[in-house]
């Protein structure tokens, strides 16, 4: 298990930074070699976080496309990341069944096993290091996830009983906290108090997103979608039904933020560490109609955000909105 911690620096890291500045990162060197050898095929293995596909891999893919005309990119990953990988602008997605997060594997062999045929010897990045390879140039190729509007139909099977109300999506648990060295999630009791302060009488309906419907949040104006949607369905629900999203630093927040579609959306994000995720990336959303309000907990702890802090931010977002129906879905403008 890879635990990410903050504020770490060492002589070894300093030497690595200097070497990267002088000679280029391993990615720079491999890309230069591929250009020199006229090699067009690239294979990436990815067995870490969901959000890092957009934050880290997509800018690397963009650099390849800019340097190598006619490049072909194959991304090999585990099943739960497959739909996100399909939005990353790659040519092929290969899914390795049974792959456990952070377990080592051979992406080239997996690609060949699944019938991928390469032109010559591809350039292989079995364990990419975007944090290192994008250091100091994250904004050079801003992340964007390609959305096919036909995927909006993914939301049609999911009933959202919110006609005439403003729909607020809420990702109540990042569900990957064990992979990080700090708290990422706002407490469940704080979420319950927030939901209670925005009942149906305030003209809102809540959609809960996540992998599992635990803990429970039982309110009459809440529809719990946790564990009931794929990634495409979740994003389609946000696009078709949600006017506001409240979420911690997470893969869902990242996916929504970098979705390359013009959809009116206000995002209220909750943070322990503002030096991570989309805040670290420092790139604007490709969605010109997205407005973002990040909230940072005192002492780098999201638990120090009070319910009143989040209620105030959310009330400010809701104040100018009024519900109306657009293309058969409830939005607000």
Image (tube, rainbow, N blue to C red):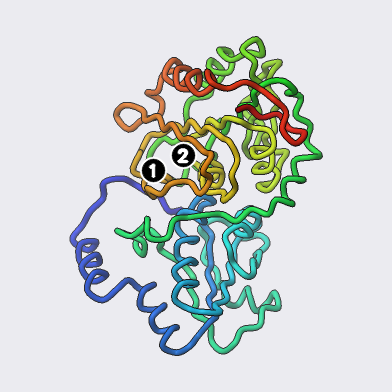
**Gap between marks 2 and 1, in whole Å?**
9 Å
| Rendered position, 52 above or below 94 | above
Expressed as whole percent of the image width and height from the top left, the position of residue 221 reads 69, 18
- Give neighbour class at mark 2: few <14, some 14-19, many 20+ (Cα, 10 Å): many
Q: Residue at x 38, y 43 (%)?
A: 279
Disc on the earlier residue, 2 or 1: 2
Q: Residue at x 36, y 38 (%)?
A: 273
Q: Which mark is residue 279?
A: 1
Quarter of the image for residue 63 reads bottom left
Expressed as whole percent of the image width and height from the top left, the position of residue 49 reads 51, 52
Quarter of the image for residue 265 reads top right
> On the picture, is 174 further left or further right than 214?
left
Which residue is at the front of the view, 134 or 126? 134
Q: Are marks 2 and 1 in contact (CB under 8 Å)?
A: yes
- Which element carries disc 1, helix, strand or loop? helix
| Rendered position, 140 above or below 262 | below
Mark 2 lies on residue: 249
Q: Residue at x 24, y 64 (%)?
A: 17
């Amino acid at each position: 298990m890879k635990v990410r911690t903050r504020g770490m620096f060492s002589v070894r890291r300093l030497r690595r930074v200097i070497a990267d500045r002088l000679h280029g990162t391993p990615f720079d060197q491999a890309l230069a070699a591929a250009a020199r050898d006229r090699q067009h095929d690239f294979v990436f293995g990815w067995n870490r976080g969901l959000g890092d596909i957009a934050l880290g891999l997509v800018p690397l893919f963009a650099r390849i496309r800019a340097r190598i005309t006619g490049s072909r990119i194959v991304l090999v990953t585990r099943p739960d990341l497959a739909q996100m990988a399909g939005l990353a602008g790659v040519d092929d997605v290969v899914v390795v069944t049974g792959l456990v997060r952070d377990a080592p594997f051979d992406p080239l062999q997996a690609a060949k096993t699944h019938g991928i045929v390469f032109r010559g010897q591809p350039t292989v990045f079995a364990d990419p290091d975007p944090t290192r390879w994008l250091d100091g140039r994250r904004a050079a190729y801003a992340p964007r996830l390609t959305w096919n509007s036909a995927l909006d139909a993914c939301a049609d099977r999911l009933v959202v009983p919110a006609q005439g109300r403003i729909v607020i999506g809420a990702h109540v648990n990042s569900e990957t906290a064990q992979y990080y060295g700090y708290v990422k999630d706002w407490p469940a009791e704080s979420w319950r108090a927030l939901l209670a302060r925005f009942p149906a009488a305030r003209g809102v309906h809540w959609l809960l997103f996540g992998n599992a419907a635990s803990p429970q949040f039982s309110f009459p104006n809440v529809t719990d979608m946790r564990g009931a949607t794929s990634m495409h369905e979740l994003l389609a629900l946000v696009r078709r039904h949600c006017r506001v999203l409240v979420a911690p630093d997470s893969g869902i927040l990242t996916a929504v933020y970098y979705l390359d579609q013009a959809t009116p959306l206000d995002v209220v994000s909750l943070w322990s560490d503002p030096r991570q995720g989309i805040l670290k990336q420092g790139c604007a959303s490709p969605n010109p109609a997205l407005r973002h309000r990040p909230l940072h907990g005192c002492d780098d702890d999201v638990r120090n955000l009070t319910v009143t802090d989040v209620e105030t931010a959310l009330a400010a977002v809701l104040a100018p909105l009024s519900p109306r129906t657009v293309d058969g879905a409830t939005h607000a403008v």
